[in-house]
Image (cartoon, rainbow, N blue to C red):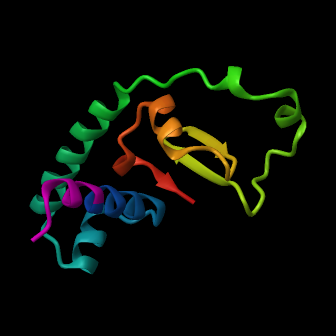
Amino acid sequence: MKTTTQNLMLWEQRIKERVQNRMTIGEWCKKNGVSKYQYNYWKRRVSKKQKTDEEITFADISSIVSNNDANRQHSASASEFQIFFKSMQVTVPSDFKPTALAGLMKLNVGSVAVN
């Protein structure tokens, strides 16, 4: 059985996919065998979670970027990874400590999509 957190993450992804595919709620529900009531229930739950997530304050990371980093291309190399969270995109070098990143951004790791 999935936890509430797992269900919230699953439904957040489902809702994003429905919007990205430009499907109506009715079309998506019919295709996926879900009632509109169930869809709207989870949409409200996800919206409430997202409002809570918006209250997270991000630390200013511009002061840790060196001049060499600033002159590099914005595309990530194979040894780097990018974190996307809402409208924010962060490229993190491979030698960056995960605990430092988590502390710096004050994020719940479960709510971040990593590419």
Residue 90: percent from the left, percent from the top?
62, 41
Residue 54: percent from the left, percent from the top?
37, 29
Q: What are the residue bounds of the magenta stretch?
A: 1-9
Q: Up-down: is 92 above or below 54? A: below
On whether residue 7 falls in the magenta region, the answer is yes
Task: Say left or right for 30 vs 17.
Answer: left
Q: In which quarter of the image is residue 30?
A: bottom left
Q: Which residue is drawn at 47% across and 61% down?
A: 20
Q: Which residue is drawn at 67% across and 53% down?
A: 94
Q: In which quarter of the image is residue 35?
A: bottom left
Q: Which of 58 and 25 is in front in this view?
A: 58
Residue 12: percent from the left, percent from the top?
31, 55
Q: Which residue is drawn at 59% across and 21% down?
A: 60
Task: Say left or right for 19 vs 93.
Answer: left
Task: Say left or right for 89 vs 43.
Answer: right
Residue 111: percent from the left, percent from the top?
37, 47
State the quadrant of the N terminus. Answer: bottom left
On whether residue 61 falls in the magenta region, the answer is no
State the quadrant of the C terminus. Answer: bottom right
Magenta segment, prevailing SS (helix, strand or loop): helix
